[in-house]
Amino acid sequence: MSDEKNEIEKLIDDMISSGDELVTNLKTILPNSLFESMVLFHESNVTNLKKIKEFLNK
């Protein structure tokens, strides 16, 4: 189970960093209003992913 937990944590970290990169790249393409919505959506996802990661560490 420990290996599976480590894989899930790694996947979560990868999802967060990929999302950060995507949001950064979209900043140059999207109008400000859409970009702000994308940032809020990404922040919500990061919060949820961190909660999942925290739950795994209980």
Image (tube, grey):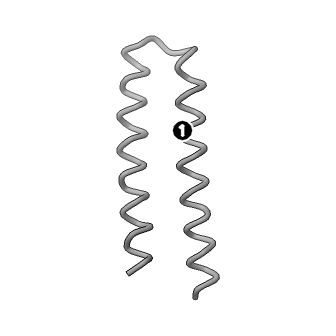
Q: Secondary structure at mark 1?
A: helix
User: Residue 8: x and y, percent?
Assistant: 57, 70
Q: Is residue 4 above or below residue 22?
A: below
Left or right of residue 58, residue 3 in this image:
right
> In the picture, which quadrant includes the N terminus?
bottom right
Residue 36 lies, in percent from the top left, at 37, 23
Q: Crowdedness of circle 1 by 10 Å Cα count: few (<14), some, many (20+)?
A: some
Give the residue type that dot 1 points to: Asp
- The image quarter in which residue 3 lies: bottom right
Instruction: Find residue 13 and report its horizontal and vertical position in percent.
Output: 56, 57
Residue at the (41%, 31%) spot, across then down: 39
Q: In the figure, is residue 28 to the left or right of 39? A: right
- 26 relative to 43, above or below: above
- State the residue position of label 1: 20
Vertical comparison of 20 with 34: above or below: below
Residue 9 percent coordinates (x, y)? 55, 67
